[in-house]
Image (tube, grey):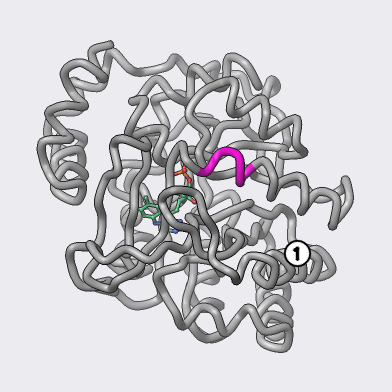
Amino acid sequence: MIYKNIIRPLLFSLNPEKAHKVYELFVEYLPFVFLPFRVKSSNNLAAQKLVSGINVDNRVGLAAGFDKNAKVFHSIASFGFGYIIVGTVTLLPKEGNAKPRFRRLSQYQALVNSMGFPNDGVDKVVQRLCSYRPKLRNTALVVSISGTTVHEISECLKMVEPFCDAIELNLSSPNTKGIKVFHQKENLRELLKELNELRSKPLWVKLPSYGTAQVNGVYGDDYQKSKQLVLNLAQFSVEFGVDALTVANSRSINDSQMATGFGGLSGKILIEDTITMIKDVRNHVGDLIPLNGCGGIFDASDAERVIKAGATTVQVYSGLIYEGPTVAKNISKSIG
Ligand SMILES: Cc1cc2nc3c(=O)[nH]c(=O)nc-3n(C[C@H](O)[C@H](O)[C@H](O)COP(=O)(O)O)c2cc1C
């Protein structure tokens, strides 16, 4: 109630990037304002469960992109998430795409972004992981990494792995064209082979969504082709022994209000597609590989449907913005 009636209208009066900065400032300088939203940690490691290769108190994760630079993950963890994904981080700092690159579509409880991985680079992120990780208690920490070459991604993995519980490989941002090189089998083979040689922690692969969408839910004619691509990427990742698949990233969308003219669609509007994709991927790759459902999960009922469709855990991004800091607690009460 406090969030929806007071905090959200204030934050929504700012543009989304400014609102995010304000949030980061509050975490740094006035952290006590979040006290009412804190969920008491069980502090009982024995009660944790192993999902997608990591030990968690519950199966609700914060999706990649909210804490790109590892500035606030310790604060968000206190809202009751079972795991937090920091990043996507790249080897070198990146400014990202031109602005405007982030907007709300409040009538659909949706977001469009064309950020293009703005981040401080892996060195800075690792420094912050070291500083803030001790504040995490039982919440598992996953770092999302990406890049456009095998070298760049492997170097990133080497640097972040000692400071996290698992890595999520982002091959799917609709806003960073270069990463599509890894949608070709030969390139993905080379990348996963290299990462397998280097890693000692679980590796997740975050898959793209099907096709280009419009806000009214109509798909472009690339739907079938891109569905096949997603299923092939899933199968191939499983053959290379990855520990979980995240289904899926934001949906590609043409949007003239983004400086780039395109972006990724997130939010409530995605829930039916997420369920469809989870069912398809589950049918395609079998029962053994854990799936993290992501896209449009706002409440316990969404999460239950995604789990019933075949997901092992759920991830939330837009739900945190529209529903507020109680979102993880509300969902985890139901799916555990
Ligand atoms: C502003 C913004 C930035 C994002 N940045 C990333 C990112 O860096 N890496 C990534 O894997 N996904 C990123 N995402 C996608 C989310 O992790 C998630 O897959 C997507 O928003 C769908 O989930 P939702 O409907 O719960 O928001 C971003 C989403 C938004 C809205």
Residue beneath the point at 65% across and 57% down: 204
Q: Left or right of 217: which side holds 222?
A: right
Query: Looking at mark 1, is its residue's CB closer than 8 Å to ligand 1?
Result: no
Dividing the picture into quarters, in which one does residue 87 lie?
bottom left
Q: Which residue is mark 1?
A: 231
Q: Is residue 333 left or right of residue 285?
A: left
Q: Assign the magenta stretch its main secondary structure.
A: helix
Is 272 within the magenta?
A: yes
Q: Give the x, y percent position of residue 197.
A: 72, 76
On screen, residue 82 versus residue 215, left or right, reads: right
Whether residue 119 is visible: no
In the rendered image, residue 245 lying in the magenta stretch gets the answer no
- Tell me the SS state at disc 1: helix
Taking the spot 54% from the left edge, 66% from the top edge, the residue there is: 220
Query: Residue 225, located in which quarter of the rendered image?
Result: bottom right
Q: Nearer the viewer, residue 146 or 15?
A: 15
* Mark 1 surroundings: few (<14), some (14-19) or many (≥20) residues within 10 A: many
x, y percentage for residue 1? 28, 11
Please name the amino acid that badge 1 sits on.
Answer: Leu
111 left or right of 178 in image: left
- In the image, residue 166 sits, relative to residue 230, either above or below, namely above
Look at the image and give the residue range highlighted in magenta.
Answer: 270-274
